[in-house]
Amino acid sequence: MNPERHRTPSSDVARAIVDAAAALLDESGPSALSIRAIAERAQVAPMGVYNHFGDKSAVLDHLYQRGAHDFQAALAASASEQDPLVALRGIGHAYRRFANERSAEFALLFLQPIPGFLPSPESHAAVIRAFQIFVDTLSRCQETGLLVNGDTVDLANFIWASIHGFVLLERTSWSEVTKQLGDADFEAFLNHLGDGFFSRPQ
Amino acid sequence: MNPERHRTPSSDVARAIVDAAAALLDESGPSALSIRAIAERAQVAPMGVYNHFGDKSAVLDHLYQRGAHDFQAALAASASEQDPLVALRGIGHAYRRFANERSAEFALLFLQPIPGFLPSPESHAAVIRAFQIFVDTLSRCQETGLLVNGDTVDLANFIWASIHGFVLLERTSWSEVTKQLGDADFEAFLNHLGDGFFSRPQ
DNA sequence: CTTACAATAGAACACCGTGCTACAGTGGAG
DNA sequence: CTCCACTGTAGCACGGTGTTCTATTGTAAG
């Protein structure tokens, strides 16, 4: 019996490891993602990482997979609204919320922070599915006649890009250039996307 | 004292080093930015970096500074158009061109790829100046009555964010989710930003 | 031409972190 | 009570890090 040895319950160890990787990626960037750092953050010995994942990249795979799944689920939940315009706006909010609350996973999904990293095809499919949900919702909006006509995929790219940009400005230290963006700004932003930045002739 | 007759003009070497850093940052990410890699890429011995820059971070400082200056200059050039709407659209194109052609500097300016890096206040001021140019141009557009009324800085943030988002989708491997975005898409994107995504009642 | 100097390249320094594995305890499931 | 999967400790083998020392060389000034 060695009093210096501890055994931690294995229940949530795997999850703790993935969480630790996410937190590190968030706070200190990709270069901080070492086995030792992840293990320490997860309150686990370095070996613990290898007990639950084959190697280092498997941890990232799981993080990406989790992110892709939850992102897709969040968008799907918003898209299930009956009113297509409500659904559309909800997707915008879900996108922003995911980016803010699951920052590391969002970066992994859309910002390619780790040069060599390639997601598994299944996880990547979840991202494509999420975009398709957005396209479908836009299509429903077009059917109501409230949304402008045109190639739906193109429109989806444009609106997605706009929201993406807003969310990314929030992420970075854009506040040091101008004001800090917030909830009210996002609402106004969505309104302006709908109405356009050119004044509407009466 | 003819600077063009130096055996290997310092300015050229210094520039080669900064270029090398930019190329590496672009191609292999922040972790590839080592003194040795930069020196090799610039066809210079590792010591060459220290001959022209105090230390490693000074190279990044210069890269940021160069990027901030050129970015601001590019926006200023477009803003000098007399027609404010032409100027506005020109700024959009200049933004996108800079992001595509000076990818590493763009990332350094707006994506914080290197966790510990803090730009010098002077360089940062150039970025703020660039944004102010954009705000001023928007203000001119509002005076013509063609642009919607409202807080100009807010509008600037919104439009800037949208363009930022488009440019970033182009940057990342978004094409694996949907189509590859191109020049024509950007034109259509700008048009939609102006007109809005809700259909306009006749 | 001679001298002085700054830029050069090569090598080394001291250091630290990396991913990963071998192995011996250990505690819960059966 | 047994078993074995999971655990923590320690260590391996390796490579790269930023930086400095030193001798050398090309070049410009006197």
Image: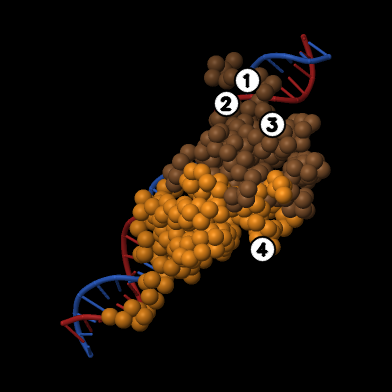
Chain colours: A brown, B orange, C blue, D red
* Residue in the image at 59% along x and 50% along y: A199
In the image, B45 versus A19, the foreground residue is: A19
| Callouts 3 and 4 in the same chain | no
Q: CA distance from mark 4 to mark 2?
A: 50 Å
- Residue B63 makes an appearance in the image: no
In the rendered structure, are the residues bearing label 1 and label 2 in contact, judged by CB atoms less than 8 Å apart?
yes
Q: Which residue is mark 4?
A: B183
Tell me which chain the residue with mark 4 is part of.
Answer: B
Q: Which residue is mark 1?
A: A8
* Residue in the image at 51% along x and 64% along y: B83
- Tell me the amino acid under the disc marked 1: Thr
- Tell me the amino acid under the disc marked 3: Asn
Q: CA distance from mark 3 to mark 4?
A: 49 Å
Residue B144 location (% of width, % of height)? 51, 56
| Nearer-N-terminus badge (2/3) | 2
Mark 1 lies on a secondary structure that is: loop
| Callouts 2 and 3 in the same chain | yes
Q: Which residue is mark 2?
A: A43
Residue A81 location (% of width, % of height)? 77, 31
